[in-house]
């Protein structure tokens, strides 16, 4: 983000909730006259002011340097007064020490035009002193702008969050926070069911997790790729399911008002245990425990309950996204063609992109649930009663997949309709321009011929020129009419 835009945003955040009629103009001025440009111009002014003091220059070069000096000074004057007028608080802006220095920089040259100063001559000590003061003032302002520009760029280093391990026992009665790797090994080797949630996993943690679970490191890293779609892989002693949790944020304005981030989650079903691994810190553990407690019965093994609750939770997040997409489609379709905002195409395209990502994700998730239902994944204690619950999830995933596909197709139709409408209107304008141009060229050319009738060697009369002109214009008008170019 440009520095001027950051400044404008901070000002807007400070005055959030208040009407700001100058905002658009202020952003335009900051875009045209950013601090980076003013730093460059201030640096240019330093040698321009110093060289005439230190070196005696020929008249032509001195005139050129003077021209550069006053041109840059004019830009400084325009910048100062525009930003002063467009400031939210003009008096506070004016009293800012560096803005007072800006004012001093543009006032000092004007002193040289005062009668008692100009009579002293260009080489007078007073004028030289004023020019040197300008050098220091411009240099100080340049340094401040540079520091201000650099400080506006975020330099926060990424924070390394330590590995987090949470454990739930088979009765969903006891949960343990901040469990160490060594302690986790004891829970996993216990004959009772256990759910372990490992989050904030970095590459440096993969070796220890791989050794603990007895799963090759390269396999864990290849499965935990957040950009890939949901999938399931089953091996001799364990099964691995990769899913993505969608987190949706809605902003009231902007083409990307529906923002969706997806965090990957790896589920490992190993003997009587279920282990979930996430690269990010999430509230998934507490959310799943709360939901699973309501669904769990004493006859259900924790591995089945937790797996069902997690898949149900992920489908619930996807359902929110599908519902939001459908609402956005309805809202966009209700906007008349003539009243569509300028960012209509960008908004629609962004929503279609989100829908396009959601459709295959739901398709793969449905296939995962179908595989679990068919008992191809070894789950301890999985019975026909559990199969019915997973069948319900399969039906819900199928419905959401169809709804997301319909939303994607409708958004694509809106994109196509908007592009076609825009192209048609552009075509209409170009046709009108072609008609006006064609009908304008004919009288222009014939007018030149008509103005040179007197003295030409041919027997051409003025009425003949006008007759040919009228026939050609009528013919072209008839052609354009038949082609439909005169219809708006």
Image (spheres, grey):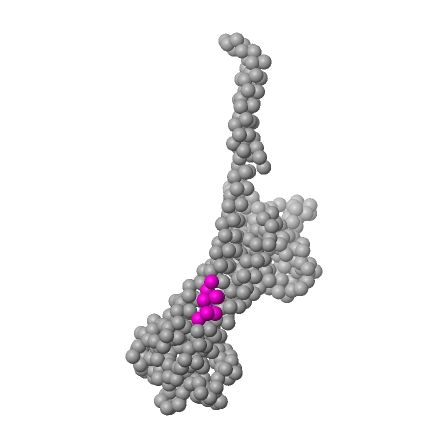
Q: At x 54% / y 61%, what residue is drawn?
A: 326
Q: Would you say 391 lies left or right of 459 here? A: left
Identify which residue is drawn at 45% across, 77% down: 389
Q: Where does the C terminus fall, quadrant-wise?
A: top right
Q: Would you say residue 247 sits in the magenta stretch?
A: no
Residue drawn at the location 67% of the way across and 64% of the way down: 17
Q: Quadrant of residue 447?
A: top right
- Camera-nearest residue between 417 and 41: 417
Q: Is residue 355 placed above or below 428 in the rendered structure?
A: below
Q: Nearer the viewer, residue 181 or 290?
A: 290
Q: Main secondary structure of the magenta part?
A: helix
- Is residue 401 covered in magenta? yes
Decide if residue 18 is on the left or right side of residue 57.
Answer: right
Residue range highlighted in magenta: 394-402
Q: Position of residue 82 (x, y in %)?
A: 64, 52
Residue 28 visible from this viewpoint:
no
Tell me if 444 is positioned left or right of 277 in this view: right
- The residue furthest right is 91
Q: Residue at x 50, y 84 (%)?
A: 293
């Amino acid at each position: 983000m440009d520095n001027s835009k950051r400044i404008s945003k901070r000002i807007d955040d400070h005055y959030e909730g208040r009407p700001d009629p100058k905002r658009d103009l202020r952003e335009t001025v900051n875009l045209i006259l950013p601090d980076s440009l003013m730093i460059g111009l201030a640096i240019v002014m330093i040698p321009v002011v110093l060289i005439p003091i230190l070196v005696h220059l020929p008249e032509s070069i001195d005139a050129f340097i003077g021209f550069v000096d006053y041109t840059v000074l004019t830009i400084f004057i325009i910048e100062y007064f525009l930003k002063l007028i467009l400031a939210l608080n003009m008096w506070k802006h004016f009293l800012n020490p560096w803005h007072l220095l800006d004012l001093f920089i543009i006032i000092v040259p004007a002193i040289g035009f005062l009668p008692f100063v100009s009579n002293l001559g260009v080489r007078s000590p007073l004028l030289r002193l004023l020019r040197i003061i300008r050098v220091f003032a411009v240099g100080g302002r340049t340094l401040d702008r540079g520091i201000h520009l650099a400080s506006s760029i975020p330099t926060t280093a990424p924070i390394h969050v330590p590995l987090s391990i949470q454990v739930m026992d088979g009765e969903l009665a006891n949960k343990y926070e901040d469990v160490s790797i060594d302690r986790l090994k004891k829970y996993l080797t216990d004959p009772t069911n256990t759910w372990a949630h490992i989050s904030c996993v970095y590459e440096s943690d993969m070796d220890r997790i791989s050794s603990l679970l007895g799963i090759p490191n390269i396999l864990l890293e290849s499965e935990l790729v957040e950009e890939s779609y949901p999938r399931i892989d089953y091996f001799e002693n364990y099964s691995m399911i990769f899913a993505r949790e969608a987190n949706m944020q809605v902003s009231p304005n902007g083409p990307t008002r529906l923002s969706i981030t997806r965090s990957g989650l790896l589920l490992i079903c190993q003997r009587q245990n279920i282990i979930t691994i996430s690269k990010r810190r999430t509230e998934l553990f507490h959310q799943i425990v709360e939901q699973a407690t309501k669904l769990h019965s004493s006859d259900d093994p924790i591995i089945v309950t937790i797996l069902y609750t997690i898949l149900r939770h992920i489908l619930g997040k996807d359902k929110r996204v599908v519902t939001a997409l459908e609402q956005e489609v309805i809202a966009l379709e209700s906007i008349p063609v003539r009243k569509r905002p300028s960012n209509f195409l960008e908004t629609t395209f962004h929503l279609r992109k989100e829908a396009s990502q959601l459709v295959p994700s739901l398709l793969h998730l449905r296939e995962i649930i179908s595989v679990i239902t068919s008992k191809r994944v070894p789950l301890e204690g999985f019975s026909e009663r559990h199969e019915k619950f997973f069948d319900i999830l399969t039906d819900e995933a199928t419905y959401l997949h169809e709804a997301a596909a319909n939303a994607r197709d409708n958004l694509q139709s809106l994109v196509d309709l908007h592009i076609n409408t825009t192209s048609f209107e552009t075509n209409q304008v170009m046709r009108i321009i072609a008609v006006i141009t064609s009908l304008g060229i004919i009288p222009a050319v014939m007018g030149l011929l008509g103005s040179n009738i007197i003295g030409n060697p041919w027997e051409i009369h003025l009425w003949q020129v006008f007759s040919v002109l009228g026939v050609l214009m009528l013919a072209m008008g008839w052609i354009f009419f038949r082609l439909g170019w005169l219809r708006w």
